[in-house]
Amino acid sequence: MLDRFLNVLIGKPLANEQHASEKYNVLFGLAVMASDAISSVAYAAEEILFVLIGVIGLESYKWLGWVSLMIIGLLFILTISYIQIIKAYPQGGGAYIVAKENIGVKAGLIAAASLLIDYILTVAVSASAGMEAIVSAYPSLGRHEVFLVVLLIIVLTILNLRGVSESSKIFSVPTYLFIISMLFMVVYGLIRYSLYGAPAPMLSEHLKATGDLSVFLILKAFSSGCSALTGLEAVSNSVPNFKEPSQKNAIWVMILLSTLIFFIFGGTSILARFYQAYPTSAGTPTVISQIAFGVFGRTFMFYVVQITTAIILLMACNTAFTGFPMLMYVVGKDRFVPRQFTVRGKRLSFSTGIISLSFVAGILVIAFDAVTSKLIPLYSVGVFLSFTLAQTGMVIHWKKCKEPGWQKRAVINGIGAVVSLITAVITVSVKFTEGAWIVAIVIPVLVLIMIAIEKHYSKVAERLSIADEELINTKMDEKFGHIMVVPIQSLNKASINALKYARSITPDVIALSIYTNKSEQEKLQSKWDHLDTDILLVSEYSPYRAVVTPLLKYVDTIAKSTAKNDKITILLSQFIVDEWWGNILHNHTSFLLRETILHNENIVVSTCPYHFHEKSYEKK
Amino acid sequence: MLDRFLNVLIGKPLANEQHASEKYNVLFGLAVMASDAISSVAYAAEEILFVLIGVIGLESYKWLGWVSLMIIGLLFILTISYIQIIKAYPQGGGAYIVAKENIGVKAGLIAAASLLIDYILTVAVSASAGMEAIVSAYPSLGRHEVFLVVLLIIVLTILNLRGVSESSKIFSVPTYLFIISMLFMVVYGLIRYSLYGAPAPMLSEHLKATGDLSVFLILKAFSSGCSALTGLEAVSNSVPNFKEPSQKNAIWVMILLSTLIFFIFGGTSILARFYQAYPTSAGTPTVISQIAFGVFGRTFMFYVVQITTAIILLMACNTAFTGFPMLMYVVGKDRFVPRQFTVRGKRLSFSTGIISLSFVAGILVIAFDAVTSKLIPLYSVGVFLSFTLAQTGMVIHWKKCKEPGWQKRAVINGIGAVVSLITAVITVSVKFTEGAWIVAIVIPVLVLIMIAIEKHYSKVAERLSIADEELINTKMDEKFGHIMVVPIQSLNKASINALKYARSITPDVIALSIYTNKSEQEKLQSKWDHLDTDILLVSEYSPYRAVVTPLLKYVDTIAKSTAKNDKITILLSQFIVDEWWGNILHNHTSFLLRETILHNENIVVSTCPYHFHEKSYEKK
């Protein structure tokens, strides 16, 4: 029943052979890679203003320009650095791989932990920001925002479990719609402003400065705005997914992407200043929606901007649903995360990764009330930490390979590394109390857990493995005597069935009754006397109502009294009912017994099922 | 590790023989039985005023008197009716037993469902009201009220899992403290008022009437006030727990209890009028605390009243922790609830019942923000429904036994039944939209579930049972051939171990490898070739990455090709790691396989554990 439900929800299973992936050309690749990076401009200017406006009032609009310029400078440096990574890693150089190969395993794990956290935050932030865009257009939805964001994440989870990422060509349509509508807004807004000026800046009188301008404040605004640069690494991770010449195509996408960020982010920053868009603490109406309103009024284009913004943010969200499970798979191949993350689900997607991602992101959304500006402080630390590690790894890479012109390349990546590190340090220090401390704790904890997991897997593999020579000498046909212990509570069809099975394997069968109630034991004994058998019925009183302890104690006793080589097997009888809810009412003892014995003793535990509907395998 | 933690938390296991219970004398019995019934006066007057004051303003205080008189009349009738039950059921006559024996199983189940719901509500209401008493004295705690109430319930759960109810003699101290301090407040308050009058009734000007007096309003106030009578049935349930002459002692307790309710409830109603105590929608300060403030000022006695009120409410809460699991046990003996409820835990308490109770009550508290007046509408319906059924059962009882004077007794219980029924109907109708509808749905649903459970257990018992004649004719030593299928993923110490075990039982062993990855399969095959054995290695490709389906399909194939009588067993190898968290990383496949096969096929599933630490049973 559950199976059928899942088939409807996430689709019929796909065979291994159906795994195929399309290669991107430049335009399609840009659409796929762009959503994460470009979508962040939907909130970057807002986040900068949010930091400034409460303190320095109207002055903020001037400083918005300077901060935006700093971020654009950073964008320029990072773009050049990442083009270098594309050149050096044609097989795709995620921060994890670059850092691991060049710096060391721990650096790789730090990069991986940072990226994993950022994927989770991308889902939480993008889904929340997307919903804020919708709420800005339809304010009546505001009351249910958290619920709607969680619902959105659930829908995305289902789509991704179906494997939506494989068929993502249609996704390029909304990306281009967003790009075009944003560029149009920037151009039209600038022209309109130069012709008519802005509508009366209503807010100016409210905007009293309450504090002083400080370096700290500007750095804080800068670090908030740096969220515009998240997702920049996506292209370098997926070079092999591009059509040949893949590196050249990837570089083109990288350049186009940076150019678009430059125009859209720069443009909206200028417009925010002209139209004096004002970030609210509730998150809606968003700055972008205020700009759109200022530029277009409440016309058709206003709604186009809102809706394409919402869609691009959803798609950014979706990139995390591809990136997170893929990174978990890569890290899992090195055994740093549980094996389940490396197994493809029914629809060939990495279901464990997808579900874990949406679960954690959902909790974050609920904990932070789906308000973007509360989530942002957690965000940039990881991004820039992974940028730093990737760039540092590249410096070492160039030093090692020493191909012609390596010094120049090393310097470029070196600058990228230093700038990223500075940004990361700024973010941690200015936002420490606002939530960055969480990330500062979670990253090292994650790294330690990953190391422990790898150690564990290695230890197990080593202890289990048998060398070939040892295999050759293994004697497979040792002879054992067998003793079967069958715990029974009463004499019924299920227990008779189990006793018969035991008897067919060995003559040494012991029926063991563990009782807490004298009268029940007497009832069993009198029923037993009707049975024509020489199987021994042993009754053991359990004063503490436990079953496992007396059972294991009894097994100890017989183990001592039998030949060294004899194998003791515990055979449990278990009846299986048809009703799915029947299991709530039965079989708890069998289940518990089985798991406890297996985990405590080196004894084989067999379970002999007794089905009411004789659904035997011959008839199927 | 978990075991040790539980031992610290709830104490060392107790043996069956340690089960003992003290018998109550009148004074001790009154203390035990009184807390539930007497504690409800702490909120009854408040609930009446809460209904009236928003509508008819100052007029409320006059009507408070009339409504209280109606409730006291009801108290009188119910007391006499319950004394009759005590006389007729010296073995303890809970509503479930009385209704089941005299009216029928369904009536019994309705009474049981009502009582179960009321026990849950007693916990939620008493814990919330107790915390309101504390918050009235220390308002700064108000912010954390829901959290504190839930914490309280958790503490009570732990205490009851330890088996606190057995040693409850010390509990009579706070009960008497509460009784004395309330009686003192009533007497002192009345004297003070007659000498000095009340302090200026500050509220009078705020209390504007906003609506008209109506029969509906008065009935609503009456039904709210009836919460003062909950817990009245406790004495009749536990007649056998009294010292000899047990019936006489129980009747004495019943009379004393009613007298106390009469004085305390009546007295506080009068004082509430004199001091114009005013119920707030947040629940605090409570009416009782306002009276105490009016009578004593912010003196030592004010705090005594608040604290003893809080304690008595906690103790009322605690009675539900005894009553609910006990009722579940009684109903479970008749197989209407899952068997787990009839099993005593480590400390001889019915742990399943205790944990279920606190879980559901905790959810209610969270859902209703721990505000007493929101929970009260759910409350009285069940109480009076069970009263009605118990009294009706008694009428039938008298009619059947026809002992001298039965007509008089039948009339008394008949009046009790009619009055209870009227109260229940009033409560459902006037409070339907405020939450009584929930109870009106939950009771029938619970009854249906209980009937379905009983049917299920009966069916299973019937199908499993074997008659004695059949037992005599059972041939225990049928001969079967055995085929063992050992699924393996790779050749390691654990799988070799399993194969050896299989081989020692039957020569017909098949190693089955289900693979999704060609290269892994080849690796396994080349390792296998080193092995000196004639065991067959069968490799099956699984295109959909599932393990169970191809395994069962293969079993089908061999089942068809072997002799009819041969038994097929699936033997799983499972390695067990030492770390407790290791299980998160391993063994999911084994676990899933085992459960799925057992639930689908009539095949024995054996599990051969491989422990890294050779913790074999001989060495223990």
Image (cartoon, coloured by chain):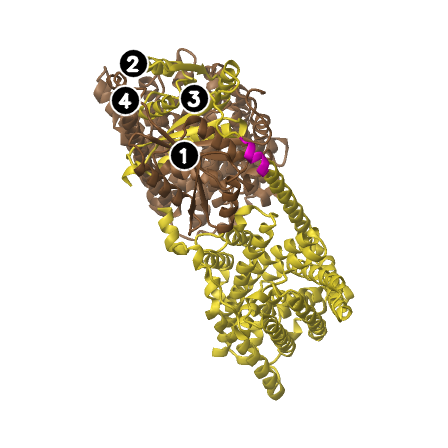
Chain colours: A brown, B yellow
Callout 2 environment at 10 Å: few (<14), some (14 to 19), or many (20+)?
A: some
Comparing B318 with A612, the one in front is A612
Amino acid identity at mark 1: Asp
Residue at image position (51%, 13%) is B561
- Residue at the disc numbered 1: A118
Amino acid identity at mark 4: Ile
Label 2: state its secondary structure: loop
Q: CA distance from mark 2 to mark 3?
A: 22 Å
Magenta region: B465-474
Q: CA distance from mark 4 to mark 1?
A: 41 Å
Label 1: state its secondary structure: helix
- Nearer-N-terminus badge (4/1): 1
Residue at image position (37%, 48%) is B3
Q: CA distance from mark 1 to mark 3?
A: 49 Å
The image shows residue A50 at horizontal and vertical percentages of: 46, 44
B501 up-or-down from B11: above or below: above
- Residue at the disc numbered 3: B484
Q: Chain of mark 4?
A: A
Identify the mark at residue A466; answer none if there is no mark. Answer: 4
The image shows residue B415 at horizontal and vertical percentages of: 76, 67
Whether residues under marks 1 and 3 lie with C-beta atoms below 8 angstroms apart, the answer is no
Q: Are marks 2 and 3 on the same chain?
A: yes
Q: Are marks 4 and 3 on the same chain?
A: no
Q: Are marks 2 and 4 on the same chain?
A: no
- The answer to whether B399 appears left or right of A72 in the picture is right
- The answer to whether A331 appears left or right of B182 in the picture is left
Q: Is residue A581 visible?
A: no
Identify the mark at residue B530; answer none if there is no mark. Answer: 2
Most extreme residue toward the bottom, as rendered? B195
